[in-house]
Amino acid sequence: MTEFLELRAARPGDELLLLDLIRELAEYERLAHEVEATTGDISESLFGGGGVAEAVIAEWEGKAVGFALFFRNFSTFVGRPGLYLEDLYVRETHRGKGIGKALLLHLAGIARKRNYGRMEWSVLDWNQPAIDFYNSLGARPMSDWTVFRLDEEALNAL
């Protein structure tokens, strides 16, 4: 199975590929109307001077079939940085081949290598296949927490 899979760090030139994968993820999550990102935004955020995020591309037999995008956060309780997984996506045609698990294991390895205290992410309440998958890996839902967000309009109003 894994002989067909290669995970690699995203690199300059992958911006359009990443944007296409982000759009596919947004379609799956029923949030396509929220995608504002451009290839320029991706380039600056991942490869610019102050790169604030990183991405890993999953390739199956040389073809991009998924990605994980993450960034460093910080836990005051743990007293160390952590890895926040913003997006994990595998194209429907390649689900069930262990690609999502391989991406998560890869990110867990990055977190361990960098001495991060934990790894966190959010999942939509209705996405039961993802919830079941994360539970099977030993992840636990943080049901006592509610995510809040100030979008750009709210930030400007504030």
Image (cartoon, rainbow, N blue to C red):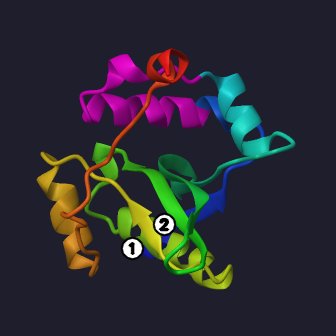
Q: Secondary structure at mark 2?
A: helix
Nearest the eye: 153 or 85: 153
Q: Position of residue 120 (x, y in %)?
A: 42, 65
**Residue projecting furthest to the front:** 158
Location of the N terminus (image quadrant): bottom left
Badge 2 amino acid: Phe
The residue that mark 1 highlights is: 1
Instruction: Tell whether 155 sits left or right of 130.
Output: right
Residue at the (16%, 57%) spot, across then down: 129
| Contact flag, marks 2 and 1 (Cβ < 8 Å) | yes
Residue 111 shown left or right of residue 14 in the figure: left
Q: Amino acid at mark 1?
A: Met
* Residue ID for mark 2: 4
Q: Left or right: where does residue 46 sit relative to residue 143? A: right
Nearer-the-camera pick, 112 or 1: 112
Which residue is depicted at the point 68% across and 38% down? 14
- Nearer the observer, 18 or 48: 48
What range is drawn magenta here? Answer: 17-37
Residue 65 drawn at (x, y percent)? 45, 48
- Vertically, is 136 above or below 97? below
Residue 106 lies, in percent from the top left, at: 53, 73
In three-dimensional space, the C-alpha distance between marks 2 and 1, rounded to whole angstroms, equals: 6 Å
Choose between 99 and 62: the one closer to the eye: 99
Position of 116 relative to 90 (above/below): below
